[in-house]
Image: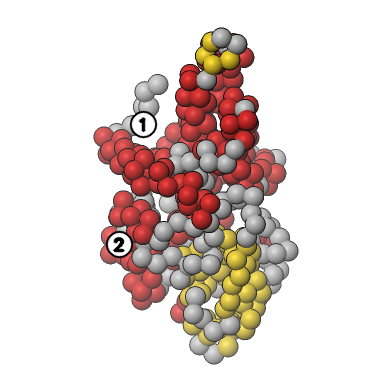
Amino acid sequence: MKNPFETEERRAFRETVARFVEAEIKPFADQWDEDGEIPWELHEKVGALGAFGFGIDEAYGGLGFDDCFMRAAYWEEMGRCGAGGVPAAMGGRNISVAPIHDLGNEDLKMRVLPNVIAGRTGSSLAITEPGGGSDVANLKTQARQDGNHWVLNGSKTFITGGMKSDHIVVAARTGGEGLTGVSLFLVDHDSPGFSRTPLDRKMGWWCSDQATLYFDDCRVPATNMLGEQDRGFIAVMNNFNLERIGLVAQCLGMMKLCLAESIAWAQQRETFGKPMIRHQVIRHKIADMSARIDALEALVNQICWAVNESANGDDMPVAEISKAKFHATKALEFCASEAMQIMGGAGYLRGNAVERTYREVKVMAIGGGSEEIMRDLAVRQMGL
């Protein structure tokens, strides 16, 4: 179906990312998953594509413009790479550069952003704590001012890219309880009092590092505060919107991968004297998968249009983004399960894209805001 929002520039960008994924990621996806990491040079290659530079001024190495359709195209094509840990391994950078760019002082931005955007160094966003995930308003990590420094105490966990990031955007409580009193800080990896340990033995995202971070009287220069004191909660919430759009688009790419793998398998595999694709039950599964893909793709396009039309984020379609997030993860769950059924025992063996995708379904339903939180947020945004 023709996309009414397609332009020559958007098509060219998508094709560039698709070719990159086909040549630079797919052939190595299984091996990287088994190895538990990706080569750092992949970060630099993706940086050269400009994929980390949306919404970042050219002075700091960014593209100098933003386009939600291109953002979505990047995440969708990365979702088709066959190993969800690959985009996750670089995703910490995508969700942490905006607060640095939008809220940091000039010296900090010039010091940090060019290398991060180019993929030479890494950055992460540290919100989730051991005692709570999506409940940002009740985070416990504390920050107290001590002269020209802030001293942080607390911990964060499930931090994507946390083991290898050079810079970490950390939310900490500088004031009272609740929505107010939360501030953002940029913590460099060599800050006194900062340490980290890896989270291993994960169900999925094998080649992406996740970490628990510890702040034990961690001293951060006062100039590393991002934005105004006690006003970080709104910045965190606004940052979540683009992260969730990326996750929705990645789900779409993963669904398309499941469909393509299912069709290819059903065309070559014979059962009861004919190709599987000729069996009605298989054809119906493929039709159901394809219908869900079409519906989600239309929704992504509509949301991207609304985001591009929003005035400085003031009329961001938060309810629609929230609904798209849980709708996408449920649709992905269906497609991944049906693909596994079509492939049967072959799909259950490690070493194929469907098995790897099936492992990643649950993290997509939790990360960036769980399905339950997204449902509640959507209804509240509806004024109910």
**Amino acid type for the residue under numbered disc 1:** Phe
Which residue is labeled 2 in the image? 61
Residue assigned mark 1: 5
Image position of 124 (left or right of 19)? right
The quarter of the rendered structure image containing the C terminus is top right
Q: Which residue appears at 51% of the width and 38% of the height?
A: 353
In the image, 34 versus 161, the foreground residue is: 34
Residue reaching furthest front?
273
Badge 1, how many Cα within 10 Å: few under 14, some, many 20+?
Answer: few
- Along the viewing direction, whichever of 81 and 238 lies nearer the viewer: 81
Q: Is any atom of residue 177 visible in this view?
A: yes
The image shows residue 313 at horizontal and vertical percentages of 46, 50
**Residue 230: x percent and y percent?**
59, 70
Q: How many marks?
A: 2
Q: Which residue is more in the foreground, 177 or 55?
A: 55
- Residue 242, horizontal then vertical, whole percent: 49, 49
- Tell me the kind of residue under disc 2: Gly
Q: Is residue 4 above or below residue 318?
A: above
* Residue 228 seen from this side: no
Query: What is the quadrant of residue 101 in the picture?
Result: bottom left
Q: Earlier in the sequence, mark 1 or mark 2?
A: 1
